[in-house]
Amino acid sequence: MRRTIRWLLSLTVLIGTATVGGVSMGSATAADTDIKDRILAIKGMSLIEEKPADGYRFFLLNYEQPVDHRHPEKGTFKQRISLLHKDENRPTVFFTSGYGLNEEPKRSEPTQMVDGNQVSMEYRFFSPSRPEPADWSKLNIRQAADDQHRIFKALKKIYGQHWVSTGGSKGGMTATYYRRFHPNDMDGTVAYVAPNDVRNDEDSAYYTFFEKVGSKKCRDRLNSTQHEIFDRRGEMVDRLKKWAKEGKYTFKLAGSADKAFELVAQDLVWGFWQYHLEEEECADVPTKDAKTAELWDWANEIGGWEAGTDQGIEYYTPYYFQAGTQMGSPDYESPLLDDVRKYPGLNTPRTYVPRDIAMKFDRKAMKDVDSWVRANASQMLFVNGQNDPWSAEPFSVGKGTDDAYVFKAPGANHGANIAGLSKDDKAVATSALLEWAGVEPAKDAKPKRLTKYDADLDKPAKQERMLLP
């Protein structure tokens, strides 16, 4: 949950939502009815657009949700979801990013492995899935889990085979919270690189991580370069002001261009380890003797100077709100920058949320989830990356859990996946996932993914990468 952002999610809003009526609910289960009509027969479901997808049908949809699941009479809002339809007789994967909705067809790793359908949900309060007016007290992990539960119940009438939930980073957290509040919905869960900040004021795991991650040679190079960028603060801030004026960026939330510089620059080492691989890219990190322009460009590539601007922050307000009210945040500040840091404590969720939105931290929320996972996690798989800062505080499963696993991918960053696990762990994870999805291989057959790689459907979109969980 670091706050610098490099690749912004596409914010394109599709206009012209069309509601299709005239199809009875009874026909939603009729095998000879077109799948689109069966989906749109669900009460509260409406079509935004159908897009082509080789081997599938892909629908962008709106689903009407209560603003408050405890008091549904107090109004509704439209929440976007997508559906990658393969066959109603195949398993279904419920994917959550924890953020906005990718409007293009993509398959998560579990979807690739089980050859199934995929439902994806836009997290509440991420535009345009935001109630108007926005009552921010209704943005919490329980309300989001209830959103997911209602979607599952509605679509289960059509997709009656096994269901598996999944997500990466904040999406992995979302999948985990969903299981905590609705433990019987899913047949299994795969949570990737999901941080578990049980005690928000305890961040020692991150300090230990950065002392040991990778090789000393790479750590020293990164630390030296980051410190040099701070040493050239005057030149950097002048560039930032000029860049912001040309691009019409502002710094009201951060407080000034100088503060925005520090917000971005202090996360550069974190950003490198989150999305870059030591063997491939550490040698390309500029040295402290590099020209200021080269250091500026490298910092922009790793952290993105727009991350300190109002325009770069605005879309992620729901995330920062949740970080400051329930999920917690790793308020890590490298001791190696103590002599050049001007604003200690600046990099906290409150900085990123408009002051007219009230925030109060709930210390019980993550403790409750952590306790539940340790004692009750069944048919759950947590995949972490050895070199991923977000994996410094992972979920753990206790002795009383059943069919639950925590694996670490060697040398992996925030993109850790089942394919990157060790041979033995990969075999266990693959076998478990296929079993949960109800498509386990024939007796004595080697467990493996059931689809071939598809560059259009399986390659991650670059703009989805960001230095947040």
Image (cartoon, helix red, strand yellow):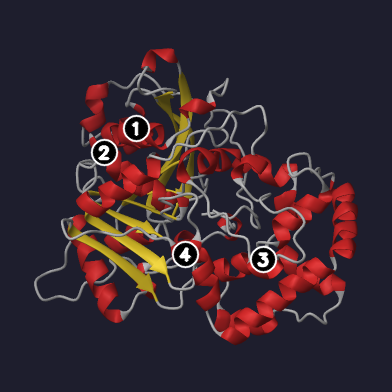
Q: On screen, 259 above or below 278?
A: above
Q: Marks 1 and 2, Cα distance to the nearest angstrom?
A: 8 Å
Q: Residue furthest top?
A: 73
Q: Marks 4 and 2, Cα distance to the nearest angstrom?
A: 30 Å
The image position of residue 298, as x and y in percent, is: 74, 70
* N-terminal-most mark, 3 or 2: 2
Q: Nearer the viewer, mark 3 or mark 2?
A: 3
Q: Marks 3 and 2, Cα distance to the nearest angstrom?
A: 38 Å
* N-terminal-most mark, 3 or 1: 1
The image position of residue 406, as x and y in percent, is: 30, 65
Mark 1 sits on what residue? 146
Numbered disc 3: secondary structure: helix
Q: Marks 3 and 1, Cα distance to the nearest angstrom?
A: 36 Å
The image position of residue 269, as x and y in percent, is: 63, 69
Residue 440 relative to residue 344: left or right: left
Residue 48 relative to residue 29: left or right: right
Mark 2 sits on what residue? 182
Give the class, few, some or many, for how many residues have Cα within 10 Å of label 4's Cα (few <14, many ≥20). some
User: Do the CB atoms of the residues marked 1 and 4 lie less than 8 Å apart?
Assistant: no
